[in-house]
Amino acid sequence: MRSLLVFRKISSRLRLRCLRNSKPFCSLSQFPKESENPSQEEQRLVYGSTLVTSEASLFPAKPDLKDDASVIGVLLNRRNNPESALQFYNWARPWRGSFEEGDLFWLLIHILVSSPDTCGRASDFLIRYVSTSNPTPMPSVSFSSLVDSAKLFGFEVNSRAFNYLLNAYSKKRQTDDAVDILSQMLELGVIPFVPYVNRTLSALVQRNSIAEAKELYSRMAAIGVDGDNCTTQLLMRASLREEKPEEALEAFSRAIERGAEPDDLLYSLAVQACCKTLNLARAKSLLREMKEKKLCVPSQQTYTSVIVASVKQGNMKEAVRIKDEMVSDGIPMNVVAATSLITGYCKINDLGSALELFHQMEKEGPSPNIVTFSVLIEWCSKNGEIDKAFEFYKKMEGLGLTLSVFHVHAIIKGCLKGQKEEEALKLFDESFETGLANVFICNSILSWLCKQGKIDKATELLRKMETRGLEPDVVSYNNVMLAHCRKKDMDLARTVFSNMLEKGLKPNNYTYSILIDGCFKNHDKENALEVINQMTSSSNEVNGVVCQTIINGLCKVGQTSKAREVLANMIKEKRFCVSCMSYNSIIDGLIKEGEMDSAVAAYKEMCGNGVSPDVVTYTILMNGLCKNNRMDQALEMRDEMKNKGVKLDITAYGALIDGFCKKSNMEGASALFSELIEEGLRPSQPVYNSLISGYRNLGNMAAALDLYKKMLKDGVRCDLGTYTTLIDGLLKEGDLILASDLYTEMQAVGIVPDEIMYTVIVNGLSKKGQFVKVVKMFEEMKKNNVTPNVLIYNTVIAGHYREGNLDEAFKLHDEMLDKGILPDGATFDILVSGKVGKFQPTRAASL
């Protein structure tokens, strides 16, 4: 609007001439290079039709400058002679004053940028215009003035004018204004000078306006201005700062495609980007390319990037090779590369090489920093090298490096792991007294004290934390609560929970899980339900762990129906994603409660809700079906497993084999045994025990003993059940010698007989009339603190009665009463009626 007002001041004759000479507004068709200058022949300084000779001949002694129109007229007469126009400006300035306003100023700029000899002065004028104006001219106004004046005075647009305006704003660090100028230039198709663009992009990247910088570059590239290596570097740095190395590599590839010759900095950034994506093959390829060109020497940072990436990828051999190559090229190793190599050695448990490199750093450099010491302290502590960890700790103190909580925590955890409790507690006390210890360190000690059952000391530490201003957090209280639950002291656990609430701490899901699980394990269903109600009424978001704890607990206390109800509500309210584990607990609980049909129904519900059964689900169901004599259904489950691609594990096979053995179907059991071996599974102890028991029940002790020998050959340890079954079967067959040998072998491997084993032996010896051995076994039971049951007492009493030792028989009767063992009908038949001949001990029902 202002330019139009100025235009009205121009005489009609002059205005007509301006309009007649006006040229269409356009931009340069090619990217202009700032260094391009017209040839000397093209630089003709004309003043009208007269060649300019001197300033004195051109201008009168006193100017007659009545208004802007007269000045504009003079300048327009000299439009083809920028030197003359500049002379006129310099001559008229003392009389007229500054022209840095209105159309006069913009006309002068257009004239000056038309010649390489005066374009520099145009740039100076624009810089002064932007820098000295108060307030700073709005970029939209400046840009419009430049455009309007070009149209008004008939100038073909010279992109230099707009670029110098951009330069003026960017030099004053008016980044937003520079961005506005550049945006308007791009809208009009004016080709920007790359150095000025780079300065603007750099300012945007420095202030973290990376998205804006990238968008501006995209618009610039859309009109064919790709920029130079500096532009690519800016884009790559911006992408790396955003943790987008792939975009950095794309920018590098675009530069190569348009024929750019990468310099060492571009190569270095590309190598760093490759390393961040762990594309070591390309990183090493670029490294070789740099060296082959010899113009671009890989920098220390470039080599370090490849070393660090190689260590992250676990390729220590390659990391060391790159380090050796760097050193052979005369580039010293820096502390980042050295520390990374030490970390790599530690991760592959080569602590010796890590320590060797550290000592090399001490002798030859670079000097270790805090990170170096931190890595060594952490890994020495993890590997049980506590003395070494302390040594580095002391070295840090000697070098004046700041010790942190991390160092103390690492050593304390290492000491506790290595069972060096005294050192851990000593260091903890020191850090606690000096104020270095924080809540995390205290929680580590609390956790250890609680696991050791030292609850009193843990409680004392809680109090000390409060007095020192280290307020215990939820984790602190959770540790102590868990310890009380493990000790089955739920009253104290709930007291700790109440204290936590009084402190204003909000219980988390783990807090509720601890209490609920503790209550259920201690058969305290009422308090468990109370905690559940408290949790659901709070604003605490219930997660899957808590729900699983509730379901497990209810199932364990025989409240599986309630557990199903809880699960149904959780699904309905979408409070957590129902898992296979939840259904497994419910199915198992129903089977244990004798609700086999309900268990199958729960399984079908599970499938209907889109939850895929796992091998545990099928194993629970097959085991329950086998125990309920529903072998056909169990085998159907097995087939369904295979159809769904769920492989049977050794436990699943064991459930089926045990079911066949209990039905005395050893042919089916043996077929499954062969199948599991073909599947590459190793038979377990329970599988062998089921088969041995099955053959024993059929009186086929030869097959049972063959399996026993195979167990030993396969390295599967026999347990008390194995020996009990074998000895029972051998005694029934009357093979006292082999039974005795197995009994001796059992004791030799450290297995102590229990009540069932003694019952089997006493039963077998009694049937064979081995009363002396029966008495011996009876006395052995007492020495081993195994209380004889009624059956054994009756067997021994009957024996004494047969031998005529009535006093001993009645003495044993009194002993039974003293131990709280109630005599049964057989006892009275022996002692009162003398029915010894009719008394025959029976095999233990549990076998």
Image (cartoon, rainbow, N blue to C red):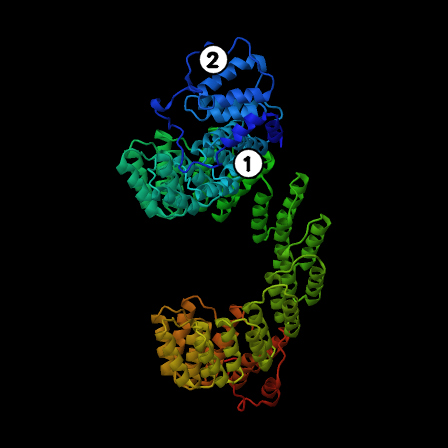
- Element under disc 2: helix
Q: Nearer the viewer, residue 821 or 282?
A: 282
Q: Which mark is residue 58?
A: 2
Q: Nearer the viewer, residue 804 or 774?
A: 774
Q: Which residue is pictured at 63% across the width and 79% down the height?
A: 822
Question: Where does residue 189 sit, x and y in percent of width and height?
Answer: 47, 39
Question: Where does residue 228 sit, x and y in percent of width and height?
Answer: 39, 36
Question: Where does residue 211 sit, x and y in percent of width and height?
Answer: 52, 43
Q: Residues within 10 Å of mark 2 (few under 14, many from 20)?
A: few
Q: Which mark is residue 300?
A: none
Q: Is residue 565 left or right of residue 404?
A: right
Please report contact status of discs 2 and 1: CB closer than 8 Å, yes or no: no
Q: Residues within 10 Å of mark 1 (few under 14, many from 20)?
A: some
Q: Amino acid at mark 1?
A: Asp
Residue behind mark 1: 180
Which mark's residue is nearer the viewer, 2 or 1? Answer: 2
